[in-house]
């Protein structure tokens, strides 16, 4: 107990304040805010990120994430880190967020980015929250410039049909980041053709009958799961269209690196 | 009703339902076009859907149903207890545990038959445990042993899946507990069919012994029945059938309970006559259930176990009701 108290005191007495009024101890409890904060925070400002940020299957910054202490997103451990700002996602456990707010800790909740516009807004918001507006503006500017180059390079012409299909037959909706990435890369999406704005499950049978020119699947994870078995179904292998694999980490979060996936898919056309 | 006309009736129902199953799916296709695509391979993706997606699913429904119906009837004959059903007394749960261990340790990826073999081993341990704990203990001992075995096997299955490095493995718990035939392919048919055939063969030959056993063990022995051999045949046959069915379709409960229960009045008290009828009836029931899950929630993969429990639990309750007061 005394030890904990001492630690607590020590942590309270040693805040790093990079900019006046900017939070000095920021804790992120969501994979996407982890990575955005890692790119934008001042040295020492971000004190903890989630364990997921170190998972190479989920995070594009797994290696860099080794430099930060990690948390499991539990209210108790986050509180003991004495943050003056917590970054959470819309789908972070709501009881955790509510508990932290009850304890008087400001929590900034980010919606999942469903478009490039959302992403740019998130970058700007993160910059404002961390007191790092110039860095955020530079990042948003570089992103916009690269996006413009990709758009200019994707030739007009026929737009082949593409569908994303992952474990449990999940297909991203057309109003999602994956949808915008495919559209930008020069494809029409099956989700748009079927009028599915939100992500939904698409039975294998319906996918095969739609016979898309490109099926984008995730990579099959380690171990084994029945949920991923349809990805190896012979009927999927017998389709005439191309197959591409985009790893989850490359587009589950709205990070500038989504343009790498966009670039790659553009060349599959 | 004669045995022959019962078999013909069930056979006709089976054929009709097999065609209905082939015509059931998310895509609305004219029946003739669909069947033509099935036979000729057709132009474009429809042939693929009929031959690689719907056909293996329908075949597996028949195989899984027949295996579970037959094992239920044989177990009930051996234990002389209408509640002895692989799903209810935990044998399917033990088979699922074996399958999950084979999948998560990578054994199933190393050679194709590892999955059904591991499920068979799980089922074998399950049957042996049940016979050891409740072989002579009456209904109550059987049900209690079954509850304990189910709980233990399901808990271990959940533990193994939660320990898996695969992010989707934990969601598979529902599949292993409730069963489904969604997105099965001929790969599944190929790994399950040999074990189901072996199990079926073993169980089909137990009819005479089980008939004799209805008169009691001593009477059966005096009629020249080798009881040890009979027990072994039922144990191995059930383990092979239930193991193979569970390895590809998860735990599909109540088939072996409902089907013998419905057919027993039609074939009389003879286990030998019940065995083939229960196999046909099991296939019919699982085909109906698998069509129903696709009609109720198209494209949502409603689990077979949900439907089977809705049908099976009332039958189970009815059996318990009738057994009140008996030891």
Image (spheres, coloured by chain):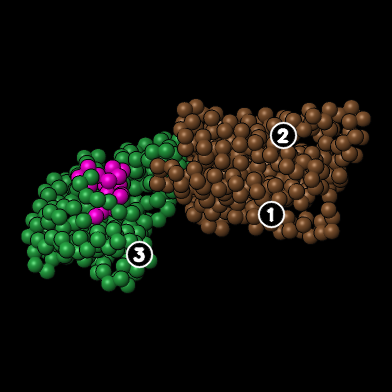
Q: Residue furthest front?
A: A2
The region drawn magenta spans: A48-65
**Image location of residue B122, percent across then percent down:** 61, 36
Query: Counting other residues with Cα less than 10 Å from the Cα at mark 2, is it few (<14), some (14-19), or many (20 or more)?
Result: many
* Secondary structure beneath label 3: helix
Quarter of the image for residue B127 reads top right
Q: CA distance from mark 2 to mark 1?
A: 23 Å
Q: Is residue B22 magenta?
A: no
Identify the residue under disc 2: B235
The answer to which of B182 and A254 lies nearer the viewer is: A254
Q: Which chain is green?
A: A
Q: Quadrant of the N terminus of chain A?
A: bottom left
**Image location of residue A109, percent across then percent down:** 27, 65
Chain letter belonging to callout 2: B
What colour has chain B?
brown
Query: Counting other residues with Cα less than 10 Å from the Cα at mark 3, is it few (<14), some (14-19), or many (20 or more)?
Result: some
Report the disc number at residue A96: 3
Q: Do we see residue B258 in this rendering?
A: yes
Identify the residue under disc 1: B312
Which of the two discs, 2 and 1, sits closer to the camera? 2
Same chain letter for marks 3 and 1? no
The answer to which of A137 and B136 lies nearer the viewer is: B136
* Secondary structure beneath label 2: helix
The answer to which of B309 and A262 lies nearer the viewer is: B309
Give the residue drawn at x 73%, y 39%: B131
Q: Earlier in the sequence, mark 2 or mark 1?
A: 2
Give the residue drawn at x 27%, y 72%: A104
Q: Quadrant of the C terminus of chain A?
A: top left
Q: CA distance from mark 3 to mark 1?
A: 41 Å
Chain letter belonging to callout 3: A
Q: How many marks?
A: 3
């Amino acid at each position: 107990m005394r030890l904990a108290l001492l630690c607590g005191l020590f942590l309270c007495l040693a805040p790093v304040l990079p900019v006046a009024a900017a939070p000095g101890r920021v804790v992120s409890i969501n994979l996407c805010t982890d990575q955005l904060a890692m790119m934008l925070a001042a040295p020492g400002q971000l004190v903890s990120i989630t364990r997921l940020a170190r998972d190479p299957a989920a995070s594009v910054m797994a290696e860099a994430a080794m430099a930060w202490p990690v948390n499991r997103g539990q209210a108790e451990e986050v509180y003991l880190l004495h943050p003056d700002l917590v970054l959470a996602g819309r789908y972070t456990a709501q009881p955790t967020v509510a508990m932290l707010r009850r304890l008087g800790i400001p929590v900034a909740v980010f919606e999942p980015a469903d478009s490039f516009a959302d992403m740019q807004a998130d970058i700007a918001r993160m910059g404002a929250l961390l007191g790092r507006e110039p860095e955020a503006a530079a990042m948003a500017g570089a992103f916009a410039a690269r996006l413009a180059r990709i758009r200019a390079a994707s030739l007009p012409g026929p737009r082949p049909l593409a569908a994303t299909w992952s474990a449990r037959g999940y297909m991203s909706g057309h109003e999602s980041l994956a949808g915008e990435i495919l559209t930008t890369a020069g494809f029409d999406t099956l989700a748009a053709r079927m009028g599915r704005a939100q992500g939904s499950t698409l039975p294998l049978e319906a996918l095969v009958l739609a016979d898309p020119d490109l099926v984008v699947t995730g990579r099959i994870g380690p171990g084994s799961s029945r949920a991923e078995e349809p990805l190896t179904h012979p009927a999927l292998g017998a389709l005439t269209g191309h197959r591409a694999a985009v790893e989850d980490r490359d587009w589950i979060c709205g990070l500038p690196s989504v343009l790498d996936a966009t670039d790659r898919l553009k060349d599959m056309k | 009703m004669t045995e022959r006309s019962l078999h013909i009736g069930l056979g006709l129902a089976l054929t009709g339902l097999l065609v209905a199953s082939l015509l059931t799916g998310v895509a609305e296709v004219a029946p003739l076009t669909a069947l033509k695509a099935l036979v000729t391979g057709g132009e474009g993706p429809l042939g693929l859907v009929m031959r690689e997606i719907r056909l293996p699913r329908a075949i597996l429904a028949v195989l899984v149903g027949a295996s579970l119906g037959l094992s239920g009837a044989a177990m009930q004959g051996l234990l002389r207890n209408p509640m002895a059903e692989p799903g209810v007394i935990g044998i399917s749960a033990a088979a699922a545990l074996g399958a999950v261990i084979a999948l998560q340790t990578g054994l199933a990826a190393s050679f194709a038959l590892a999955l059904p073999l591991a499920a068979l081993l799980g089922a074998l341990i399950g049957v042996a445990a049940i016979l050891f704990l409740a072989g002579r203990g009456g209904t109550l001992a059987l049900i209690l042993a079954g509850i304990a075995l189910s709980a233990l096997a399901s808990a271990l299955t959940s533990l193994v899946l939660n320990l898996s490095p695969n992010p989707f493995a934990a969601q598979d718990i529902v599949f292993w507990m409730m069963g489904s035939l969604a997105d099965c392919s001929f790969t599944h048919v190929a790994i399950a069919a040999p074990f189901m055939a072996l199990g079926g063969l073993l169980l089909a030959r137990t009819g005479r012994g089980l008939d004799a056993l209805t008169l009691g063990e001593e009477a059966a022995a005096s009629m020249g029945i080798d009881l040890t051999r009979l027990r072994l045949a039922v144990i191995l046959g059930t383990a092979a059938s239930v193991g193979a069915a569970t390895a590809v379709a998860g735990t599909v409960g109540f088939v072996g309970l409902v089907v013998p229960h419905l057919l027993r009045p039609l074939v009389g008290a003879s286990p030998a006559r019940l065995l083939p009828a229960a196999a046909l009836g099991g296939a019919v029931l699982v085909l109906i259930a698998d069509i129903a899950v696709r009609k109720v929630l198209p494209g949502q993969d409603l689990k077979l176990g949900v439907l089977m429990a809705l049908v099976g639990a009332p039958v189970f309750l009815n059996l318990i009701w009738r057994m009140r007061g008996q030891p």
